[in-house]
Image (cartoon, grey):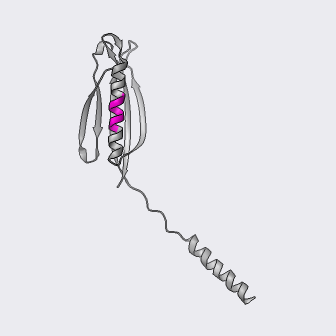
Amino acid sequence: MKNALAIFAFLLLIGGFFAFKPAPKAVRYDYSQMTTIESVVPGGLGRSRMLINEKGGNKDEIDMKNFFSLGGINFGNINNNEQLILEKISQMNANGWELYNITPGVVSPSANSTGIFITRYLFRKEK
Protein backbone atom coordinates (compact mmCIF):
# COMPACT_ATOMS: atom_id res chain seq x y z
CA MET A 1 0.00 0.00 0.00
CA LYS A 2 2.88 2.32 0.84
CA ASN A 3 4.38 1.73 -2.62
CA ALA A 4 1.09 2.46 -4.36
CA LEU A 5 0.75 5.72 -2.41
CA ALA A 6 4.33 6.69 -3.26
CA ILE A 7 3.76 5.95 -6.97
CA PHE A 8 0.52 7.97 -6.92
CA ALA A 9 2.29 10.94 -5.25
CA PHE A 10 5.14 10.67 -7.77
CA LEU A 11 2.69 10.69 -10.71
CA LEU A 12 0.90 13.74 -9.28
CA LEU A 13 4.22 15.54 -8.90
CA ILE A 14 5.29 14.71 -12.48
CA GLY A 15 1.85 15.61 -13.86
CA GLY A 16 1.95 18.94 -12.04
CA PHE A 17 5.41 19.66 -13.41
CA PHE A 18 4.26 19.22 -17.02
CA ALA A 19 0.99 21.08 -16.46
CA PHE A 20 2.70 24.37 -15.58
CA LYS A 21 4.38 25.41 -18.82
CA PRO A 22 5.53 28.99 -19.14
CA ALA A 23 3.23 31.18 -21.19
CA PRO A 24 4.42 31.59 -24.80
CA LYS A 25 6.12 34.89 -25.55
CA ALA A 26 4.11 37.33 -27.62
CA VAL A 27 5.66 37.58 -31.08
CA ARG A 28 6.35 41.10 -32.31
CA TYR A 29 6.73 42.02 -35.97
CA ASP A 30 8.05 44.74 -38.23
CA TYR A 31 5.92 45.42 -41.30
CA SER A 32 6.64 46.49 -44.87
CA GLN A 33 4.14 47.43 -47.58
CA MET A 34 4.33 47.01 -51.35
CA THR A 35 1.60 48.45 -53.58
CA THR A 36 1.19 47.81 -57.29
CA ILE A 37 -0.88 50.23 -59.34
CA GLU A 38 -1.60 48.98 -62.85
CA SER A 39 -3.26 51.32 -65.31
CA VAL A 40 -6.20 50.32 -67.48
CA VAL A 41 -6.18 53.30 -69.84
CA PRO A 42 -6.52 52.63 -73.59
CA GLY A 43 -3.61 53.55 -75.84
CA GLY A 44 -0.95 53.08 -73.17
CA LEU A 45 -1.54 56.56 -71.77
CA GLY A 46 -1.80 55.47 -68.14
CA ARG A 47 0.95 55.18 -65.53
CA SER A 48 1.69 51.96 -63.67
CA ARG A 49 4.00 51.73 -60.66
CA MET A 50 5.20 49.53 -57.84
CA LEU A 51 5.61 51.44 -54.58
CA ILE A 52 7.60 49.94 -51.71
CA ASN A 53 7.52 51.39 -48.18
CA GLU A 54 9.91 49.59 -45.88
CA LYS A 55 10.58 49.87 -42.17
CA GLY A 56 12.67 52.89 -41.34
CA GLY A 57 11.03 55.08 -43.98
CA ASN A 58 12.88 53.65 -46.99
CA LYS A 59 10.78 54.15 -50.11
CA ASP A 60 11.20 52.89 -53.65
CA GLU A 61 9.20 53.40 -56.83
CA ILE A 62 9.53 51.06 -59.81
CA ASP A 63 7.97 51.69 -63.23
CA MET A 64 5.63 49.01 -64.50
CA LYS A 65 4.01 48.52 -67.90
CA ASN A 66 0.44 49.54 -68.68
CA PHE A 67 -2.14 46.84 -69.46
CA PHE A 68 -2.93 48.49 -72.80
CA SER A 69 -0.74 49.70 -75.64
CA LEU A 70 -1.84 51.37 -78.87
CA GLY A 71 -2.86 47.95 -80.24
CA GLY A 72 -5.12 47.08 -77.28
CA ILE A 73 -4.49 44.78 -74.33
CA ASN A 74 -0.80 43.89 -74.18
CA PHE A 75 -0.16 40.45 -72.68
CA GLY A 76 3.61 41.03 -72.88
CA ASN A 77 3.20 44.01 -70.56
CA ILE A 78 1.07 41.98 -68.16
CA ASN A 79 3.68 39.22 -68.13
CA ASN A 80 6.43 41.80 -67.51
CA ASN A 81 4.49 43.17 -64.50
CA GLU A 82 3.98 39.68 -63.10
CA GLN A 83 7.73 39.04 -63.34
CA LEU A 84 8.51 42.30 -61.51
CA ILE A 85 6.05 41.44 -58.74
CA LEU A 86 7.38 37.89 -58.33
CA GLU A 87 10.99 39.11 -58.29
CA LYS A 88 10.20 41.65 -55.57
CA ILE A 89 8.28 39.11 -53.46
CA SER A 90 11.20 36.66 -53.80
CA GLN A 91 13.67 39.40 -52.83
CA MET A 92 11.63 40.35 -49.77
CA ASN A 93 11.36 36.68 -48.78
CA ALA A 94 15.13 36.20 -49.17
CA ASN A 95 15.58 39.16 -46.79
CA GLY A 96 13.45 37.45 -44.13
CA TRP A 97 10.07 39.04 -44.90
CA GLU A 98 6.96 36.85 -44.89
CA LEU A 99 4.13 37.74 -47.29
CA TYR A 100 1.39 38.13 -44.70
CA ASN A 101 -1.61 39.61 -46.53
CA ILE A 102 -2.70 40.65 -50.02
CA THR A 103 -5.52 43.14 -50.63
CA PRO A 104 -6.69 43.67 -54.22
CA GLY A 105 -8.81 46.55 -55.44
CA VAL A 106 -10.16 48.12 -58.61
CA VAL A 107 -10.87 51.79 -59.22
CA SER A 108 -12.95 52.57 -62.29
CA PRO A 109 -14.21 56.15 -62.27
CA SER A 110 -16.13 55.75 -65.54
CA ALA A 111 -17.58 53.08 -67.79
CA ASN A 112 -15.19 53.82 -70.69
CA SER A 113 -12.52 51.23 -69.76
CA THR A 114 -10.36 53.57 -67.71
CA GLY A 115 -9.20 52.85 -64.21
CA ILE A 116 -6.55 51.08 -62.18
CA PHE A 117 -5.93 47.76 -60.52
CA ILE A 118 -4.34 48.30 -57.14
CA THR A 119 -2.92 45.50 -55.03
CA ARG A 120 -1.36 45.87 -51.59
CA TYR A 121 1.11 43.30 -50.33
CA LEU A 122 1.78 43.36 -46.58
CA PHE A 123 5.00 41.72 -45.39
CA ARG A 124 6.08 41.04 -41.84
CA LYS A 125 9.30 40.01 -40.15
CA GLU A 126 9.77 38.89 -36.58
CA LYS A 127 11.58 41.53 -34.47
The prevailing secondary structure element of the residues shown in magenta is helix
For the question of whether residue 83 can be seen, the reply is yes
The image quarter in which residue 6 lies: bottom right
The image quarter in which residue 51 lies: top left
For the question of whether residue 39 can be seen, the reply is no
Q: In this view, does 50 lie above or below 55?
A: above
The image quarter in which residue 99 lies: top left
* Residue at (42% x, 35% y) in the render: 103
For the image, the number of numbered tags is: 0
Q: Is residue 87 part of the magenta span, yes or no?
A: yes
Magenta stretch in the rendered image: 82-88
Left or right: 105 with respect to 64? right
Q: Which residue lies furthest to the top in this view?
A: 71
The quarter in which the N terminus is drawn is bottom right
Q: Where is residue 25 in the image (x, y as percent from the top left)?
A: 44, 62
Q: Where is residue 22 in the image (x, y as percent from the top left)?
A: 49, 68
Q: Is 69 in front, or is 87? A: 87
